[in-house]
Image (cartoon, rainbow, N blue to C red):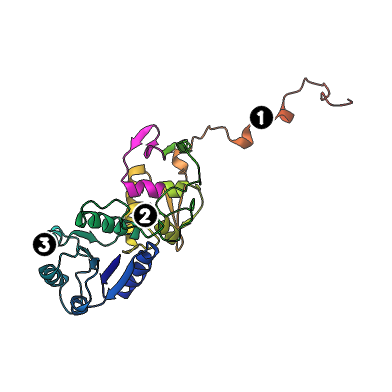
Amino acid sequence: MQVLLIEDDERIAGPLAEGLARYGYAVERARTGSAALAADEPDMVLLDLGLPDMDGIDVCRALRRRSDVPIIMITARGEEIDRVLGLELGADDYMAKPFGVRELVARIRAVSRRARPGATAGADAPEGSPDGAPAGTAEGAAVPGLPARTPGAGGPPPVEAPQGVGPLVIDRRTRQVHLHGTPIALAPKEFDLLVHLAADPGAVCSRREIVDQVWDPHFFGPTKTLDVHVAALRRKLGDPAWIETVRRVGFRLHVPDAVRPSDAVRPSDAVRPSDAVRPSGGAHPAAGA
């Protein structure tokens, strides 16, 4: 599929074109509205509204007057009036930054299916990838956002048991979280963030690692998005000490001292066979044997 990316910001356009290429899309770049209107008609248009020479709304209007090419607006303008105006002028979809490549690819496929009635879900997947995996992905290899598959394996995947971190219980299978037996309602990204931090409790996860794994390696948007989700997660867990900030590095999950049971038996306190009480004055059973 030929995609025309109309975006003047190199920091966004470069990684975005690279990310789409991984999914088999041929991307042509236009930095201005006039260059976009002069380009050959593509199969899909990704249109930023903040262009240096003209408003993206005007580009959308001009494209729609002459063509039915599918248009997805990608912009930092997230207000309802902007979304409504864009859709009313003929855009097929509207994505507000920040967003990830996986979501954008899903939107491209959905818009393509609507624009081509009767097309199958994988009709726009790269050749040799009937399930929509990026071109060159070998059978059984992991695909971002999809569980790894074993060639020839059948049957349901193994059930993963809930994980306990102190009084916090995380059930990945049902995406439910309980604290002291009380359910905690988390937004999808808040749950994914908690799961990532809980994969190795106490270990420090860098900000870049968290963004790559919880959002997308080609995530476009302010890094404050992570801080907002961390703050929301701390608030819902009832104690900010659950997620510790490691300055200039990232975050780590650990059980706050305030919720640690003081009388819990630790492994070091457990009675070992060698510490068993012996009869007074008696020899050790093994002595003299």
On screen, 1 above or below 158? below
Q: Where residue 40 sits in the image (x, y, percent)?
A: 23, 75
Asked if one can make out residue 165 in the rendered structure from this viewpoint, the answer is no
Q: Dot 1: within a 10 Å radius of its alpha carbon, few (fewer than 14), some, or many (20 or more) residues? A: few
- Residue 56 on the magenta span: no
Q: Where residue 172 sits in the image (x, y, percent)?
A: 41, 40
Q: Dot 2: within a 10 Å radius of its alpha carbon, few (fewer than 14), some, or many (20 or more) residues? A: many
> What residue sits 37% from the left and 54% below the top?
132
Q: Amino acid at mark 1?
A: Val
Q: Amino acid at mark 2?
A: Gly
Q: Secondary structure at mark 1?
A: loop
Q: Which residues are magenta?
A: 172-194
Q: Amino acid at mark 3?
A: Leu
The dot on residue 85 is 3
Q: Secondary structure at mark 2?
A: loop
- Residue 174 on the magenta span: yes
How many numbered marks appear?
3
Q: Give residue 218's quadrant in the image.
A: bottom left
In the picture of the structure, the residue carrying the numbered disc 1 is 271
> What residue sits 35% from the left and 48% below the top?
190
Q: Give residue 83's quadrant in the image.
A: bottom left
> What residue sits 40% from the left and 64% below the top?
22
